[in-house]
Image: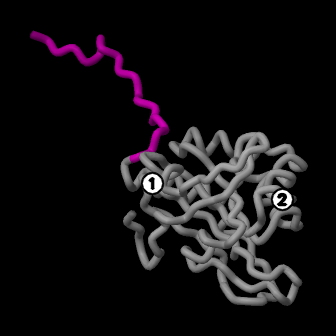
Amino acid sequence: MLNKGNLNDLSNVIFHVRENDDWKVVHLDQLMDDKKIVIFGLPGAFTPTCSTQQLPGFEAMYDQFIESGVDEIYCTSVNDTFVMNAWFESQGIEKVKPLADGCGDLARSLGMLVKKDNLGFGLRSWRYAMLVVNGTVELFCPEPNLTDDAQEDPYGNSSPAEMLTEVQVTLRELGLDDSVEEVPSVDLDSTEENV
């Protein structure tokens, strides 16, 4: 899988998820194949900004992303599938899909795995959002000042509103914008030529 910039190969990233009391292995390749997807990563389920702004914001704006040409939106965090499923249920999330990055493989592959020992969190994902088109990361929006044991938790670049704007611009530049521009009507009577 080809990726832009210095992002590492994501083709071997897998997620262990629990659906209907059964374990399922989801390969990131399968989610990205022939699709336009948004993935946003955040530090943790049930944490303040993640629970009050980022996840519910993407849920509220989900249809706007779909109308702009995105096929699906996934939320990932370095939490296990039980925690992610409980969090989504407690938040009433029905459209955005959870991706439990329990071992931090995706965050590590993206260079977004950080220590949050200062908060007792251990290893977590730095906050980011990205647009992946047919397996290629076309847009990557990490929050600034990536560092271990950060005192601040910046939030802006990966917010749903910022991401929607950036996704629309990127898809337009790639010629993949699904929105239809209004074409002005033409009065045929006024354009007839005298013969």
What residue sits 76% from the left and 53% below the top?
57
- Any magenta on residue 43? no
Residue 104 placed where, x, y %?
67, 72
Q: CA distance from mark 1 to mark 2?
A: 28 Å
Helix, strand or loop: magenta stretch? loop
Q: Earlier in the sequence, mark 1 or mark 2?
A: 2
Q: Could you say where residue 65 lies in the image, as x and y percent from the top left? A: 60, 46
Q: Nearer the viewer, mark 1 or mark 2?
A: 2
Which numbered dot is residue 70? none
Which stretch is magenta? 176-195
Q: Is residue 83 above or below residue 64?
A: below
* Image height of 69 relative to 118, above or below: above
Taking the magenta stretch, the answer to whether it contains residue 178 is: yes
Q: Residue 83: which numbered mark, if any?
A: 2
Q: Quick check: 62 left or right of 69?
A: right
Tag 2 secondary structure: helix
Query: On screen, 19 above or below 165?
Result: above
Q: Quadrant of the N terminus?
A: bottom left
32 or 26: nearer the eye? 26
For the residue labelled by badge 1, is the local secondary structure a helix, a strand or a loop? strand
Q: Which label is found at residue 133?
A: 1
Hey, what amino acid is under mark 1? Val
